Amino acid sequence: MGRRFRYQARQRIRTALGADACLIGRPYLYGLGAAGEHGVTAALTMLGDELRRTIQLLAVSSVDRLRAEGAELLRRYDGSEAGAGAGAGSGAAAPGG
Protein backbone atom coordinates (compact mmCIF):
# COMPACT_ATOMS: atom_id res chain seq x y z
CA MET A 1 0.00 0.00 0.00
CA GLY A 2 2.81 2.43 0.83
CA ARG A 3 4.42 1.92 -2.56
CA ARG A 4 1.11 2.49 -4.35
CA PHE A 5 0.46 5.66 -2.34
CA ARG A 6 3.89 7.08 -3.19
CA TYR A 7 3.33 6.33 -6.89
CA GLN A 8 -0.04 8.08 -6.89
CA ALA A 9 1.40 11.05 -5.03
CA ARG A 10 4.17 11.39 -7.63
CA GLN A 11 1.58 11.30 -10.41
CA ARG A 12 -0.40 14.11 -8.78
CA ILE A 13 2.74 16.19 -8.24
CA ARG A 14 3.67 15.80 -11.89
CA THR A 15 0.16 16.80 -12.91
CA ALA A 16 0.35 19.80 -10.60
CA LEU A 17 3.58 20.80 -12.30
CA GLY A 18 1.95 20.64 -15.72
CA ALA A 19 2.39 17.08 -17.02
CA ASP A 20 -0.03 16.22 -19.83
CA ALA A 21 0.23 12.44 -19.43
CA CYS A 22 1.76 9.70 -17.32
CA LEU A 23 2.37 6.01 -17.74
CA ILE A 24 0.22 3.74 -15.61
CA GLY A 25 2.52 0.73 -15.57
CA ARG A 26 1.07 -2.68 -14.76
CA PRO A 27 -2.47 -2.15 -13.43
CA TYR A 28 -4.10 -2.61 -16.83
CA LEU A 29 -2.10 -5.81 -17.35
CA TYR A 30 -3.33 -7.19 -14.03
CA GLY A 31 -6.87 -6.41 -15.13
CA LEU A 32 -6.26 -8.02 -18.52
CA GLY A 33 -4.90 -11.17 -16.92
CA ALA A 34 -7.71 -11.38 -14.39
CA ALA A 35 -10.74 -10.62 -16.54
CA GLY A 36 -9.75 -9.72 -20.07
CA GLU A 37 -11.24 -6.57 -21.56
CA HIS A 38 -13.62 -6.13 -18.62
CA GLY A 39 -10.65 -6.28 -16.24
CA VAL A 40 -8.84 -3.55 -18.17
CA THR A 41 -11.97 -1.40 -18.06
CA ALA A 42 -12.27 -1.99 -14.31
CA ALA A 43 -8.59 -1.11 -13.72
CA LEU A 44 -8.88 2.13 -15.70
CA THR A 45 -12.11 2.99 -13.88
CA MET A 46 -10.34 2.51 -10.53
CA LEU A 47 -7.48 4.76 -11.62
CA GLY A 48 -9.98 7.44 -12.67
CA ASP A 49 -11.83 7.14 -9.35
CA GLU A 50 -8.54 7.52 -7.46
CA LEU A 51 -7.68 10.62 -9.46
CA ARG A 52 -11.07 12.16 -8.68
CA ARG A 53 -10.71 11.32 -4.99
CA THR A 54 -7.22 12.83 -4.83
CA ILE A 55 -8.39 16.00 -6.55
CA GLN A 56 -11.23 16.29 -4.03
CA LEU A 57 -8.84 15.77 -1.11
CA LEU A 58 -6.63 18.55 -2.48
CA ALA A 59 -9.72 20.79 -2.55
CA VAL A 60 -9.50 21.61 -6.24
CA SER A 61 -12.38 21.18 -8.64
CA SER A 62 -10.63 19.79 -11.73
CA VAL A 63 -7.33 18.76 -13.28
CA ASP A 64 -7.18 22.20 -14.92
CA ARG A 65 -7.43 23.83 -11.47
CA LEU A 66 -4.77 21.43 -10.17
CA ARG A 67 -2.45 22.57 -12.95
CA ALA A 68 -3.26 26.23 -12.34
CA GLU A 69 -2.81 26.01 -8.56
CA GLY A 70 -0.28 23.18 -8.53
CA ALA A 71 2.83 25.16 -7.70
CA GLU A 72 1.02 26.93 -4.85
CA LEU A 73 -0.36 23.63 -3.52
CA LEU A 74 3.12 22.12 -3.53
CA ARG A 75 4.54 25.15 -1.71
CA ARG A 76 1.72 25.08 0.82
CA TYR A 77 2.16 21.39 1.64
CA ASP A 78 5.93 21.20 1.18
CA GLY A 79 6.96 22.75 4.47
CA SER A 80 4.53 21.22 6.93
CA GLU A 81 2.98 18.16 5.32
CA ALA A 82 5.34 16.89 2.62
CA GLY A 83 8.04 15.84 5.07
CA ALA A 84 5.47 14.41 7.46
CA GLY A 85 3.58 12.79 4.59
CA ALA A 86 6.65 10.98 3.32
CA GLY A 87 7.35 9.58 6.77
CA ALA A 88 3.71 8.76 7.38
CA GLY A 89 3.41 6.94 4.06
CA SER A 90 6.48 4.84 4.80
CA GLY A 91 5.35 4.12 8.36
CA ALA A 92 1.80 3.32 7.29
CA ALA A 93 3.04 0.53 5.03
CA ALA A 94 4.85 -1.32 7.84
CA PRO A 95 1.93 -1.77 10.32
CA GLY A 96 -0.60 -2.47 7.56
CA GLY A 97 1.46 -5.26 6.13
Image: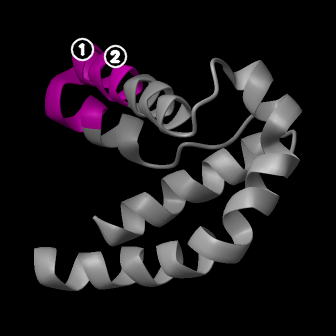
43 or 2, which is in the foreground?
Answer: 2
Q: Which mark is residue 38?
A: 1
Give SS at disc 2.
helix
Q: Is residue 94 magenta?
A: no
The image position of residue 96, as x and y in percent, is 13, 74
Residue at the image position 27 percent from the left and 33 percent from the top:
31
Magenta extent? 31-46
Residue at the image position 74 percent from the left and 58 percent from the top:
76
Q: Quadrant of the N terminus?
A: bottom left
Give SS at disc 1.
helix
For residue 25, say whether it is visible: yes
Amino acid, disc 2: Thr
Q: Taking 81 as reference, is 64 left or right?
A: right
Decide: marks 2, 1 in contact (CB < 8 A)? yes
* Residue that carries the numbered disc 2 in the rendered image: 41
The image position of residue 24, as x and y in percent, is 54, 43
The image position of residue 86, as x and y in percent, is 51, 78
Query: For the residue carrying disc 1, how many other residues have a C-alpha within 10 Å: few (<14), some (14-19), or many (20+)?
Result: few
Residue at the image position 81 percent from the left and 61 percent from the top:
75
The image position of residue 68, as x and y in percent, is 87, 30
For residue 97, say whether it is visible: no
Query: For the residue carrying disc 2, how many other residues have a C-alpha within 10 Å: few (<14), some (14-19), or many (20+)?
Result: some
96 or 83, which is in the foreground?
Answer: 83
Q: Taking 57 as reference, is 72 left or right?
A: right
Amino acid, disc 1: His
Residue at the image position 27 percent from the left and 76 percent from the top:
92
